């Protein structure tokens, strides 16, 4: 639960879009890391409309089950925001600067 509370306090600025899927998109985001030292200055922000967020909510639960595994990206929590008149469900994730696992294995691009 502490992560959920931290996410509510994290301020970020959405940057370029890294990928898009049918219902969600991933953006690079910069944070005010000095406010919460456990959050890096760059994160991946996976977002979708709140009304279509069940898949991201399930992903959050999956990440929570494996949060102690060093081979799984970290999730810093969730936050619902209003942007351009839309309610968005945002998953705050560790940014994998080396690309996705699919990229590294040479697999076809996966939908976000």
Image (tube, rainbow, N blue to C red):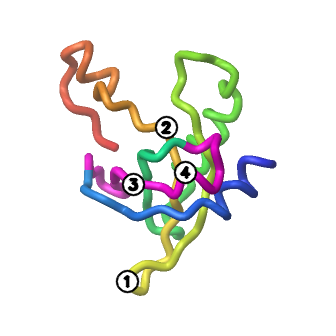
Give the residue displayed 29% in from the left and 28% down from the top.
99
Residue wearing tag 3:
29
Answer few, some or many: residues within 10 Å of disc 1's Cα (few below 14, many 20 plus, some between 14 and 19). Answer: few
Upstream in sequence: badge 3 or badge 1: 3
80 and 43: which is toward the camera: 43
Q: CA distance from mark 4 to mark 3?
A: 11 Å
Q: Is residue 59 above or below residue 54?
A: above
Stretch of the chain drawn in magenta: 18-39
22 and 8: which is toward the camera: 8
Residue wearing tag 2:
94
Residue 95 forms part of the magenta stretch: no
Q: Position of residue 102 (x, y in %)?
A: 28, 22
Q: CA distance from mark 2 to mark 3?
A: 10 Å
Answer few, some or many: residues within 10 Å of disc 3's Cα (few below 14, many 20 plus, some between 14 and 19). Answer: many
In terms of secondary structure, where does tag 4 sit? helix
Upstream in sequence: badge 4 or badge 2: 4
Q: Position of residue 83 (x, y in %)?
A: 42, 78
Image marks 4 and 3: residues in contact by CB distance under 8 Å: no
Residue wearing tag 4:
33
59 and 103: which is toward the camera: 103
In terms of secondary structure, where does tag 3 sit? strand
State the mark number for residue 84.
1
Q: Quadrant of residue 103?
A: top left
19 and 10: which is toward the camera: 10
State the mark number for residue 107.
none
The nearer-to-camera label among 2 and 1 is 2
Q: CA distance from mark 4 to mark 2?
A: 13 Å
Answer few, some or many: residues within 10 Å of disc 4's Cα (few below 14, many 20 plus, some between 14 and 19). Answer: some
Q: CA distance from mark 4 to mark 1?
A: 25 Å
Upstream in sequence: badge 2 or badge 3: 3
Horizontal relation, residue 81 to residue 46: left or right: right
Give the residue displayed 61% in from the left and 45% down from the top.
76
């Amino acid at each position: 639960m502490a992560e959920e509370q931290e996410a509510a306090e994290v301020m970020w600025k959405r940057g370029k879009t890294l990928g898009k899927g049918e219902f969600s998109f991933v953006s690079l985001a910069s944070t005010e890391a000095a406010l919460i030292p456990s959050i890096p200055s760059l994160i991946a922000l996976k977002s979708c409309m709140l009304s279509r967020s069940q898949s991201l909510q399930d992903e959050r639960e999956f990440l929570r089950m494996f949060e102690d595994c060093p081979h799984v990206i970290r999730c810093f929590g969730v936050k619902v925001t209003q942007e351009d008149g839309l309610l968005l469900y945002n998953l705050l994730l560790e940014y994998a600067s080396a690309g996705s696992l699919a990229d590294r294995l040479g697999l076809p691009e996966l939908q976000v």
